[in-house]
Amino acid sequence: MSLHVSDVFSQFLPLYQQQHRLSAQQDSVSRHILQCRTPALGQQLWECDHCHQPQVVCCSCRDRHCPRCQGQRRRDWIESQAANLVNARYFHVVFTLPHELNVLSQYAPERLYGCLFQAVWQTLAKFASQHKRIPGQLGMTAVLHTWGQTLSQHIHLHCLIPGGLLSRSGQWRRIDKDYLFPVKALSTVFRAKMLAQLRENQLSVAESDKLMDKPWNVYSKACLCEPKTVVRYLARYTRQGMLHESRLQQMDSQTVSFSYRDYREPNLRKSLTLSGEEFIRRYLSHILPKGLMRIRHFGILANRCRQQKLALIRQQQIQSAVVENDKDEPREGQSEWHCPVCAKGVLRLVPLRLATRRPDN
């Protein structure tokens, strides 16, 4: 029998609440996770189109922190974002905050995360505008993650960047190198931009001199060449959530065990056992403030100018591989539920039929 995060919350959350006070957002998310796929949120009637066996399905909570609600949202997001891809290689760059700044996320998360988005974009925009051969404007889709593999506090930004620059005159030039910008130089500028953002937003940092002296972590992954691969890559980092439930291994009266990947040994998966209270604490520490956007677009991919600039770029390209791949590939959003009884038919939603009132004679 598969284990769900809701099972862990059901067993350990009451004990956790006796010792800790939940914020309004944490309380709301906890209730959503506990009620997800239960009759508390309502039910739907589905019917097999082959054997006509009825199936009652409980509704989901659709909370972005609930691991059981991300599958369909992931497919929908892939479908909506496929049209926004550029026919070029993509670069994946990860900017990580030093752990000394983690404390700021406890009392000013909106300002800290806003500073992180702005500092990363200012860093990349600076390098793009000063490019020796083709200065211009980049595009960036940035995704905020606050967790590590063990659910510890690990604040970082995943950035997917089309490999090209749009000049002020509207000329699109591809970046042919296998890397975007030098990582060490990015790290130095990112450190300065982030600390400047913190000072501007009146966020005090203890021992800021030590933060200036230590190197900040900026990591660049191998570039991605196929647009359809980019879409799946985007969805992996935007909609997977902090803990995929397949990683949960076992739970007893006091502890929870789950698997994780140690990136020092990437081919080896390890197991971590936490007390139920510590698991709840770590999970709830990653609940984002209500309304905070964890996926943001910048530059040529910014919402206010994306359609206009993408049209300009595609006019200069001989052929848009994004459109062709999008048509040739079956959409992930077209997934179907197969009947668990006959395994031949597909479940169809039975529409609600309201009784019509007879007219008075």
Image (cartoon, grey):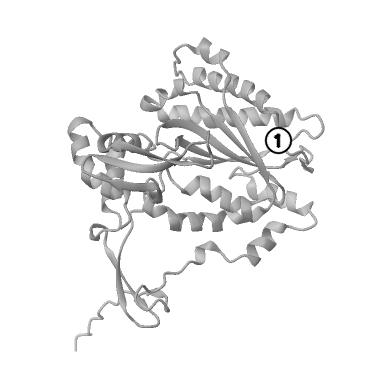
Residue at the spot 37% in from the left edge and 43% down from the top edge: 258
Residue 31 in view in this figure: no
Quadrant assignment, res 223:
top right
Residue 202, position in %: x, y?
Answer: 46, 18
Q: Closer to the camera, 298 or 355?
A: 298
Q: Closer to the camera, 115 or 219?
A: 219
Q: Closer to the camera, 31 or 217?
A: 217
Please state, as top left, top right, bottom left or bottom right, where the C terminus lies in the image: bottom left
Residue 53, position in %: x, y?
Answer: 32, 79
Left or right of 34, for residue 169: right
Q: Is residue 190 above or below residue 22?
A: above
Residue 331, position in %: x, y?
Answer: 56, 64
Q: Hey, what amino acid is under mark 1?
A: Leu
Quadrant assignment, res 142:
top right
Residue at the spot 30% in from the left edge and 54% down from the top edge: 36
Disc 1 marks which residue? 180
- Crowding around mark 1 (Cα neighbors within 10 Å: few <14, some 14 to 19, many 20+) is many
Residue 147, position in %: x, y?
Answer: 43, 35
Left or right of 354, for residue 82: right
Secondary structure state at the residue bearing disc 1: loop
Q: Is residue 195 above or below residue 73?
A: above
Please state, as top left, top right, bottom left or bottom right, where the N terminus lies in the image: bottom left
User: For the image shown, how many numbered marks are present on the structure?
Assistant: 1
Q: Is residue 233 above or below residue 343?
A: above
Residue 323 in view in this figure: yes
Residue at the spot 23% in from the left edge and 47% down from the top edge: 10
Q: Closer to the camera, 322 or 170?
A: 322
Q: Is residue 243 above or below residue 187?
A: below
Seen as rendered, the residue at the extreme right is: 133
